[in-house]
Image: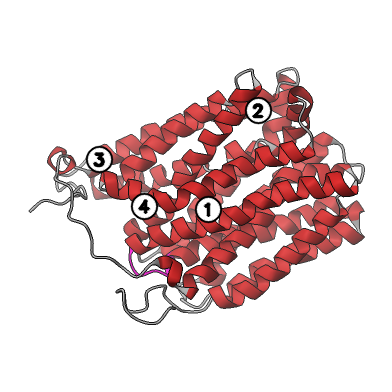
Amino acid sequence: MTTGVPARSTVPATGGPGGRAALKLVAVLLVASCLRPALTSVGPVLDLIGADAGLGNTALGVLGALPLLAFALLSPLVHLLSRRFGDADPVILWAMAALAAGTALRSLPGLAWLWAGTVVVGGAIAVGNVLVPAVVKRDHPGDLSRVTGIYTAVMTGFAALASGVAVPIAAATGGGWRWSLAVWAGLALVAAAVWAMRMRDSYTPAALSAEPAPAAPRDRPMWKSATAWQVTLFMGLQSTTFYLLANWLPAIEAEHGVDAGTAGWHLFLYHAVGIVSGLAVIAVMGRKADQRAASVLVSVPMAAAMAGMLWVPGWAVVWALLAGISAGSAIVVALALIGLRTRTHLHTTRLSGMALSVGYVLAAIGPVAAGWLADYSGTWTPVLVLVAVLALAQVYVALLAGRDRYTHPDGSSSGLPA
């Protein structure tokens, strides 16, 4: 009897089992490397975009929030695409192709292309955000935290690189912000090519032509699980602070006399230190199911960093590093919780869609609200207070989301909400 999920090939592929495992991991890491540069390359050149396109802080905040809105709208639908194609792999391949196209599109002359390309970029990244944790849960169920930490470190590293080189690329091209954004289309094409190799190495031709699987039994809705909502709020709060600072940290520092180039490298450090902190938090997490200690530990530094920016702004680089430590480790914990709080990779896909959908609604509000607050008040001080409040709220949610509970306690549609 056939199913809609392509069967793994039983024919030895080139390189043997070790080679196949390495190819799978490299493909995941390449996709992870594409999930942030198209976003973090924007912040350091926002002033150039605004000057070129005639956009104010509020409009630039909307531009920064558009990908997050795409995340919010599309994330709960991604599992339907995965079901339609029978597996996550072909959906991720098309997402990488769309990401390359959208990244190139928004760099074309004309304001309409900027907005349209940004929407396509957001939609493509939304697919990767949802499906990569599910693929990791499926392929590495016994090593979830470690593999999550590795691919998150890669994601954070390329986010840092994109923010750090954005201004130098713009300067090297005569102040052209378009090349700062367009260059990342090439990386998405490489990821798509390697992902296609992974698919060819994993499936037999007969399996790819299999009949659609019968509909799975109805399960208890993820939206009715208290545990799912706790994970979702943790994801949303950490995403809000991350994207708000990714967009506006250079502008916040500029108010205190930091030049654009230095602020851009501070943003690079904000992302780069997250690589180290994201890998370090794996040791704290271990293989434990209860992650309350790790969840609180990664949340507190963000509140401390905002207090430092308010009271000792001259130490801007220190507070950028501290905020980066929090952001880089919090995303590892948030993504790991999606896998740890679900029993199967199918539940992981659904919780991932929910967490990213609701979470990014909150995250999308952040850059827009920050731009409006700055325009209304004439200072970035209220924005720093806002981030501090969000970080303190994250500490409270961490105590709930970190508990050892499943969204579906008995793995079925019965049982009390977890």
- Label 3, on which residue? 201
- Label 4, on which residue? 79
Q: Earlier in the sequence, mark 2 or mark 1?
A: 1
Do labels 3 and 1 touch, CB within 8 Å? no
- Label 1, on which residue? 152
Q: Amino acid at mark 4?
A: His
Q: Position of residue 118 (x, y in %)?
A: 58, 33
Left/right placement of residue 242 relative to residue 230 reads: right
Which of the two residues, 203 or 90, is positioned nearer the viewer here?
Answer: 90
Q: Quadrant of residue 67?
A: top right
Q: Quadrant of residue 47?
A: top right
Marks 2 and 1: which is nearer the front? 2
Q: Earlier in the sequence, mark 3 or mark 1?
A: 1
User: Disc count in the image?
Assistant: 4
**The C terminus sits in image quarter:** bottom left
Q: Amino acid at mark 1?
A: Thr
Label ID, residue 180? 2
Mark 4–mark 2 Cα distance, whole angstroms, equals: 33 Å
Q: Earlier in the sequence, mark 1 or mark 4?
A: 4
* Mark 3 crowdedness (10 Å alpha carbons): few <14, some 14-19, many ≥20: some
Magenta residue span: 339-344
- Residue shown at 50%/78% (left/top)? 290
Q: Give the secondary structure at mark 4.
A: helix
Residue 295 included in the magenta stretch of the image: no
- Residue shown at 35%/41% (left/top)? 91
